[in-house]
Structures are given as C-alpha cells and as structure tokens.
Image: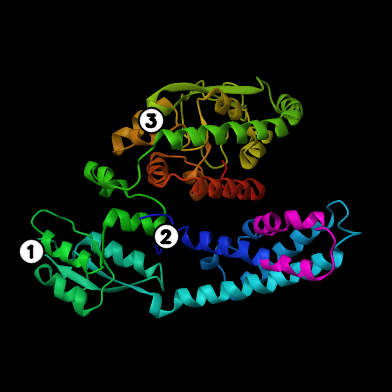
Amino acid sequence: MGLLAKGSLVRNKIILQAGDVLVGITALVPLLFLGSQTLPLWAFFFIPVVLLFSFLCEVYQPEKWTFKERLVRSSLALVLSFILLFFLPNSRNAGFQELLISMVLFFVLQNGWQILLHKSNDAHFFTEKILVIGTGTIAQKVEHLIEQSPGKYALLGYIQTPTDPICVDRTKIIGVIDDIVEIARNHNARAIVIALTERRGNLVVEKLVTCKLMGVRIIDYPSFFELMTGKIPVEHINPSWLLQSNGFLITPFIRSLKKMLDLIFSSLLLGICLPFFPIIAILIKLDSQGGIFYSQQRVGRNNTPFTIYKFRSMAKDSEKNTGASWAQENDPRVTAFGAFMRKTRIDELPQLINVLKGDMSFIGPRPERPEFVEQIKKVTQYYSERHAIKPGITGWAQVMYPYGASLGDSVEKLRYDLYYINNLSLFLDLLIIFETIKIVLFRRGGR
C-alpha cells in the first residue's frame, strides 16, 4: 500500500513535514530583499531547527489536537527555535531583525497551510468511498477502522456472499457478490475491501478484475488494517499474503544502505556519549553492588544467538531464584539509578558496540531472549520472520508501543515489527530516529 497511500498512518506526517520545508524556504526569502551581503549563520540551520522543534512539540500529529492546541504547540516550537538560533555565533549582532521576521513569517505560513490541509482532508470531495465484501466479524472490524478515520473513508455498505456469516447491521447490506460490478459503478466506489471470514467459494474473481479495470482499488483486510494502524494483523495473514505483498523484499542494496547508516549513526553517537561512560559507571557502582555492564543472550538475525551489552540496571543476581522473567511496572529488581537509566534509555548505550560488531542494527526489531522467543512462537505464527533483519537498538514497535512485559505485549509488538519489515525505507528509519529522540527527552515507555 505504501507510506504515502491515502489514509496511511504516516502519510499526514510526511506531507506536513514536506510542506514545512517549503514554508521554511519561503520564510527565508525576505533575506534577499533586506540588503544582507552574506547569509547569517542561523539561516543555514533555520529549516532543520524549526522542523525539529515542530516535531518535538508534536505539531505533526494534527489528529490529536484542536486548532487552539495546535497554535499553542506551534508557538512553543517557534519560541524554542528562536532561542536556539539566536544564541548561535554572531546571531545577536548580525541578522537579529531578519531572524525575527523569518520566524513570524514561518509561524503564519505554517499554520495557514496546515489549516487548509486539514480542511481539505475533512472535505467530502476527497473522501474515498468503500464497499466491503463480507458480513462477518472481520467486516465489522473494517467499519470500526473507518469510523476511527473520519474524512478519509466512507463506508458505502456491505456485499453479501453465499456462506459468510451475518454479524453486521443488516440495513447496511446493499447487495450480493454477483452484482459487485454494477454496485461499484452505481455507487461510484473508489475501493473494495475484501473482509471475508471464509474466502472459499465466496469470491467472483472475474468480476473483481472488472472492478479493478474500472479504476476501483481492491484491498484485502490485512493490507487495509496495515494502512490504517501501522501494524500487520498476524492472526489474519497467511504465507500467500506475505508472498504477494509489495514489501518484505530486503535487497542487498537495502542491507548495504542500512549497514552504512548503522556505522555512521553508531560511531557518531558513541563518540558523543563515550566521555560520559565513566560518570555512568561511578553512579552504577555507588547505587548498588555488582558489575557496571550486564551481558545477556539474545536472538539475532536468522535466529542466531548473540551477546548483548547494557549498563546494569538491576540488582546483582536479581534473577538467580526466578530465572528469566518479564519486565514489569515498578520492577522490584531494578535499582534506583537503574530506573532512571531505563526511563532515559541510557542503559541501552553499550549496544552501540553491538552495532559496530555487526550483531545489531541501529533500527530494527528489539532482540528477545531465547527463553521468551520459544514461548512466543507457541502462541503466534510468523515470529521467526522478524529475524529476517538484524535486531535494533530502537524500532517501529518501540516508538509505537510501550515496553513489552508479557506474551500479549510481544504479539502486539510483532504486528509493528512486521509492518516495519514490510515498509522498510530510509524515510521510515528517519521517522523512527526522531520519534526515539522524543521518547528519550520526555521519558516515555521505559520500565
């Protein structure tokens, strides 16, 4: 379906950020007419800084905020950006007036164009009308997803099939599968979602091909769910869906690109953080008895075990009597400073060494302990598929879902992990990095 497909979870963020790049360029245009001989230093950092603070202040999550809340957040982002740019070398002496003008212009244009975008998204003209083939519980789930995404999709009605059970509102059934071509044409349908409890004997493939040639998109339920939620419903997919998906194609080029980015990001971050390692080591030793580092077996790419490194956040021999056990809220095994490290993700920093060694990637599914992998495999299919790529320090599941603490959490995170593998791209990796920065700064999701 793609990251830019209509209704995609990340589509609006991509559009809003891309639009703000153009807004940022426009906001810098006055510099050309204010007699500046050379561009001030702040001008070269203007667009990255305003986009970063807009992201951190969650300006790019419009579905969460009212118009007033968006104004408050964009105002906060503007003030923080101004403060940072103002204190760059020479900014206070050269270009202060221009900086102020560009900031105000960016604020006005940013909110103006975003209001227009939200209004257009809500306009019925852009609403995609959907027919749902099926009348069972899966068809009900499609209606629920549509209700959670007002303005993007509208349910035209359900198409009944010979054997699918009827669990939906009967008044919303508008025809039978044999008449699908005429129904799609008469109702001006733009998409058909196949949401059958039982597919055998229920589909008229030739008629669906005719609908597709008419310009109607044919989407199966797992793909529609993925589009709307940013995760894959593992309980509703099968091997043929994995084969026919446009994703799950990890080429040598993608692997090489990820390896190059891993080396760049991990080297830079390790260089920045390494001077702080002695301070962290001292605080760990002062807080509790035991070693500074903690090593543990995890499962990596192709189900190969490797040793992961972390700063020790738990008391010495905390699992001696219990064995491997899940993390929990207010975990009694965690030390006082360990709790702080987990909230800020400081305990994960030694894993940069794992990245440089090639055991891990900077971004990917979190590596799990072998004991837990065996437990999870017993309750869900396709868990081994997440081991098709290297595990990561951070990932799509980590930024979208709280810290996993049970089998149920692991199954839910698998849905996000498979989405990441299916939609692997440079942009998605960059989005995860920025979301991780936000999580670390606001101390969300750790246990």
Range shown magenta? 26-53
Q: Mark 2 vs mark 3: which is more N-terminal?
A: 2
Q: Quadrant of the C terminus?
A: top right
Is residue 310 something that shows in the picture?
yes
According to the picture, the residue beneath numbered tag 2 turns out to be 8
Q: Where residue 433 sits in the image (x, y, percent)?
A: 58, 45
User: Which circle's residue, 1 or 3, is located before the other in the chain?
Assistant: 1
Residue 162 bears which disc, if any? 1
Residues at badges 1 and 3 in contact (C-beta under 8 Å)?
no
Q: Bin the neighbour count of mark 2 within 10 Å (Cα to Cα): few under 14, some 14-19, many 20 and up.
A: many
Residue at image position (25%, 77%) is 188
Residue 3, located in which quarter of the rendered image?
bottom left
Is residue 116 placed above or below 238 in the rendered structure? below
- Measured as percent of width and height from the top left, residue 307 is found at 51, 21
Using the rendered image of the protein, determine whether residue 173 is visible from the camera's viewpoint. no
Front-most of residues 427 and 435:
427
Q: Residue at x 41, y 40 (%)?
A: 410
Seen at 21% across and 65% down, the residue is: 213
The amino acid marked with disc number 1 is: Pro
Kindly state the secondary structure of the residue where label 2 is placed. Answer: loop
Q: Is residue 396 left or right of residue 56?
A: left
In three-dimensional space, the C-alpha distance between marks 2 and 3, rounded to whole angstroms, equals 30 Å
Mark 2 or mark 1, whichever is nearer to me: 2
Q: Is residue 202 left or right of residue 138?
A: left
User: Residue beneath label 3, please?
Assistant: 373
